[in-house]
Image (cartoon, rainbow, N blue to C red):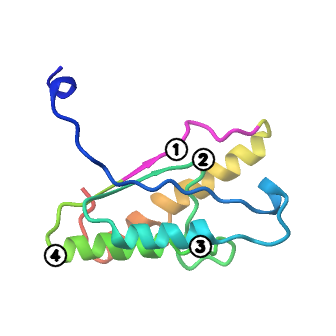
Amino acid sequence: SDFLESEPFRVNAQCVRSIGPWSAGTKSEESSIHNTYIQMIDAAKHFIYIENQFFITIAQDSVVRNQLANVLFRRIERAHNNAEKFRIYVVLPLLPGFDNTNAVRAVLYFIMCSITKGDNSLFKRLENAGKSIF
């Protein structure tokens, strides 16, 4: 109840959305959301909030080629080195919105590889660099 009675505060936020051949029928790959993610992560001062159906970003992977894992790693490393309080919130659905069981399993597998499982996961890379994540 204290929160509801407190004065409102201003938040600067930016929402981004991607389009591509599979989602909007465009003729080319569109990378502005990827570029915006990178810029926003690098510029974030206190926290990053990502809400997405997928969070697939594996460093040094031949199939997954986005740079989000690398930019998140560098931002966490910068906060750690500067003794800054910094948080990353990634909100994902319980299950991806597919009827195909194999597709759901594949998406969940790659999400886990991105965050916690395997040598190229974000957690493992931070652990190997000696950065405490909790």
**Which dot marks residue 92?**
1
Q: Is 72 located above or below residue 108 in the figure? A: below
Q: Amino acid at mark 2?
A: Gln
- Label 2 sits on residue: 53
Instruction: Judge by depth and name the residue closer to the eye, 114 or 52.
Output: 52
- Label 4 sits on residue: 82
Q: Amino acid at mark 1?
A: Leu
Mark 2 in CB contact with mark 1 (< 8 angstroms): yes
Q: CA distance from mark 4 to mark 2?
A: 32 Å
Q: Amino acid at mark 4?
A: Asn
Q: Position of residue 93 (x, y in %)?
A: 55, 39
Comes first in the chain, label 1 or label 4 = 4
Q: CA distance from mark 1 to mark 4?
A: 29 Å
- Label 3 sits on residue: 66
Q: Amino acid at mark 3?
A: Asn
Find numbered disc 4 in the image and state the secondary structure of the residue it sits on: loop
Q: Position of residue 71 (x, y in %)?
A: 43, 74
Residue shown at the point (21%, 71%) measured from the top left: 80
Label 1 environment density (alpha carbons within 10 Å; few <14, some 14–19, many ≥20): some
- State which quadrant residue 84 falls in: bottom left
Write down the region rendered in magenta.
Answer: 89-98
